[in-house]
Image: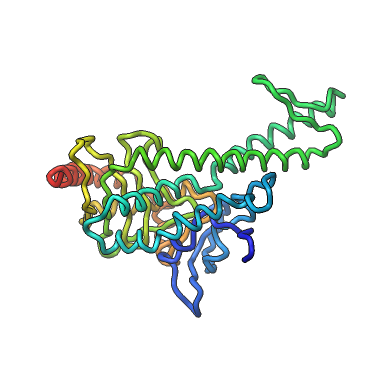
């Protein structure tokens, strides 16, 4: 069995529910938000949200190098068909079902290259600046840091040093993300799980960084949401900390016209803004989301938001009545 060299940061089991099947393949429309022309293209889900050796630890023995990719594949991703079926059709769920649903959403928050790329961009600029400085002034071939430690350019080019630092950053981030995934899953294990259905005519898009939260991810009062197809989104809402609350029901909310507008608009704007490279979905949905984003009118938004806030209060009352 070949080793998984090309590794998906957003798994195919998730992406296929936004894609169309064609000749045993799953094709999805995508748009690169890093460029200005916003051209939409069709791509096989095998080839998108994927990086070579992203989860690989190159200093480990050959048999262990890809342990993290194999963990995600054999556990979190292997459970997603069941998770998706529960979210679409389930009612009562077992504690194990609850764990699988929450674990998938939390895991996907950490499985992104956006934060690594941001860190590396800053670090690359710093290394290049430091290298240019010591070259121009004939200084020691090292960059020293205030907190201790140093980067040496002895017998190395600046590109080789940058590459090494990027590898170290990627591996360190992946270890840290794995630990955070386990920790945050345990913290949110008693969350209320809500499945939102968009109003006819509205839709959700997704991206290579699909989990959204309006707060710090560790804020215990914050909600965590992720679209699961064009019409449905799952949300993790904090429990009320009542020790008797071990709710085995999935809450379902069919969004009315106003609430659907705000939930879909909020999701789609955030997918555009937080995507690392691409937003994903049907071509017509992507075009509409991009047009809404470009022509956003804050005054119109504020008027409609007043009605939206009322709906939020009604939803909270509905959820609390079921505890």
Residue 311 point in image, percent of width and height:
19, 46
Q: Is residue 81 above or below residue 267?
A: below
Q: Is residue 290 above or below residue 177?
A: below
Residue 100 point in image, percent of width and height:
36, 52
Residue at point 50% right, 48% down?
A: 111
Residue 82 point in image, percent of width and height:
35, 62
Q: Is residue 47 left or right of residue 239?
A: right
Q: Quadrant of residue 154?
A: top right
Residue at point 12% right, 44% down?
A: 321
* Scheme of image coloration: rainbow
Residue at point 72% right, 40% down?
A: 164
Q: Is residue 88 above or below residue 119?
A: below
Q: Is residue 15 left or right of residue 202?
A: right
Residue 135 point in image, percent of width and height:
84, 29
Q: Is residue 175 above or below residue 279?
A: above
Residue at point 45% right, 58% down?
A: 77
Q: Observer-nearest residue: 296 or 178?
A: 178
């Amino acid at each position: 069995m070949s080793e998984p060299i090309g590794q998906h940061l957003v798994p195919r089991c998730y992406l296929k529910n936004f894609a169309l099947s064609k000749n045993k393949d799953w094709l999805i429309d995508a748009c690169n938000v890093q460029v200005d022309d916003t051209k939409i293209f069709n791509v096989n889900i095998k080839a998108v949200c994927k990086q070579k050796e992203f989860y690989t630890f190159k200093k480990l023995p050959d048999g262990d190098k890809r342990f993290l990719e194999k963990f995600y594949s054999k556990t979190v991703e292997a459970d997603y068909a069941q998770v998706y079926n529960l979210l679409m059709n389930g009612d009562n769920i077992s504690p194990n079902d609850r764990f699988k649903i929450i674990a998938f959403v939390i895991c996907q928050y950490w499985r992104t290259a956006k934060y690594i790329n941001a860190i590396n961009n800053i670090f690359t600029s710093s290394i290049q600046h430091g290298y240019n400085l010591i070259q121009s002034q004939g200084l020691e071939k090292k960059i020293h840091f205030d907190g201790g430690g140093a980067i040496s350019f002895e017998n190395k080019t600046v590109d080789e040093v940058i590459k090494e630092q990027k590898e170290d950053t990627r591996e360190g981030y992946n270890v840290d993300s794995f630990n955070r995934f386990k920790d945050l899953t345990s913290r949110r294990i008693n969350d209320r799980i809500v499945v939102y259905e968009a109003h006819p005519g509205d839709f959700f898009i997704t991206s290579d960084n699909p989990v959204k939260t309006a707060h710090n991810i560790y804020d215990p009062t914050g909600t965590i949401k992720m679209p699961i197809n064009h019409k449905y989104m799952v949300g993790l809402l904090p429990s009320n900390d009542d020790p008797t609350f071990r709710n085995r029901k999935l809450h379902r909310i069919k969004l009315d016209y106003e609430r659907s507008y705000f939930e879909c608009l909020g999701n789609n704007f955030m997918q555009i803004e937080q995507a690392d490279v691409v937003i994903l979905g049907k071509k017509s949905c992507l075009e509409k989301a991009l047009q809404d984003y470009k022509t956003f009118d804050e005054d119109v938004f504020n008027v409609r938001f007043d009605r939206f806030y009322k709906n939020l209060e009604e939803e909270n009352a509905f959820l609390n009545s079921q505890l």
